[in-house]
Amino acid sequence: MSKIAFVFPGQGAQYIGMAKEISEISKAAGKVLDDATEALGFDIRNLLFESDEETLMITENTQPAILAASIACTQPLIEAGIRADFTGGLSLGEYAAHVISGSIDFKDAVRLVRKRGKYMQEAVPLGEGSMAAVLGLSREDVIETCKMASEKGVVEPANFNCPGQIVIAGKVEAVNEAIKIATEKGAKRAMLLNVSAPFHCSLLKPAGEKLSRELENIVIDKMSIPVVTNVTGKIIESETEIKDLLVRQVSSSVLWEDCVRTLIENGADTFIEIGPGKVLSGFIKKIDKGVRVLNVEDKASLDNTLAVLKGQ
């Protein structure tokens, strides 16, 4: 029997118009956007459909926007009776996974990630931190590269996305030094990313501390679907771990490759990326060519996914 994993994208996948088609053809998806509007106190449809790239790129806007779009895009699958056996997400996407699992209420989650975005942006003054993608080096080489470059300041692995693609984050000078060292070590490419803060490194610990205080007010319910977590790359064993994992996630490496391998080890053979873009689909195909990868972000991709799943 095929096992399905719903997976959700993180920051960087956003674009104007995400979830528009789905929200127009699914009443449940439209209600998700209504709920987000009510929870946030501003019109989420305006942000998703009518704003500009610059506004959408502001981290405290990006995070609730992607979360709302992802949960909206999940509704037609649920309405069609498609149920996930597992769920997970990249960074911000882990919040969508918790909503779908039932462990965190959607309205709580959308308010929480708006604050998470704000705290992450505030943790490091603009211009002091950066991130870079390193292509074509092993995990061990990237870890060694960061150690060597750290004499210039904090620089750490931030995202283990898939074999041969690892993102690093830290202080500008240290990241630049790491790019130089990675290139000398034979990286195919090492390039700066267009981001506003050095996410998923120890410089973000103050953001995690603020998020921890917000999480004190959040009720965690039972997970109805197992959730894989970025911090360990494993399936969460108990609801009591969730808050601590979400706090640690802000300043820890995202072990996405490990998450995917864990899901495959547990029998997942069909991955559905839900929400804007196909970034995770690309990573998953590089991690294991043998699994089926689908996505849902608009009517065409929804129709294709439903057709494939009905045909099995």
Image (tube, helix red, strand yellow):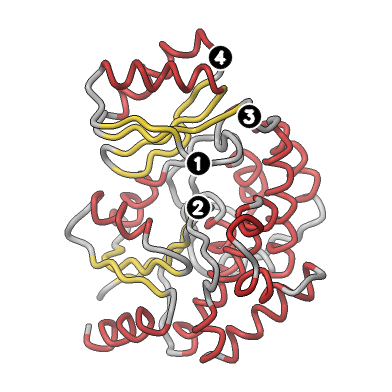
Q: Which residue is mark 3?
A: 127
The answer for how far apart the CA atoms under marks 1 and 4 are is 20 Å
Name the N-terminal-most of marks 4 and 3.
Answer: 3
Identified by mark 4, the residue type is Gly
Image coordinates of residue 220 in percent, x first then y, are 70, 60
Cα separation, mark 2 vs mark 4, equals 25 Å
Tell me the quarter of the image containing the C terminus: bottom left
* Label annotation for residue 194: 1
Percent position (x, y) of residue 148?
A: 41, 11
Q: Earlier in the sequence, mark 2 or mark 3?
A: 2
Which mark is in front, 4 or 3? 3
Tell me the element at label 1: loop
- Give the crowd class for mark 2: few <14, some 14-19, many >=20 residues within 10 Å: some
Question: Closer to us: mark 2 or mark 3?
Answer: 3
| Mark 2 / mark 4, whichever is N-terminal | 2
Q: How many marks?
A: 4
Q: Which residue is label 2 attached to?
A: 12
The label nearer to you, 1 versus 4, is 1
Q: Quadrant of residue 33?
A: bottom right
Q: Mark 4 falls on what kind of element?
A: loop
The span from disc 2 to disc 3 (Cα, nearest Å) is: 18 Å
Distance Cα–Cα, label 1 vs label 2: 9 Å
The amino acid type, in three-letter code, at marker 2 is Gly
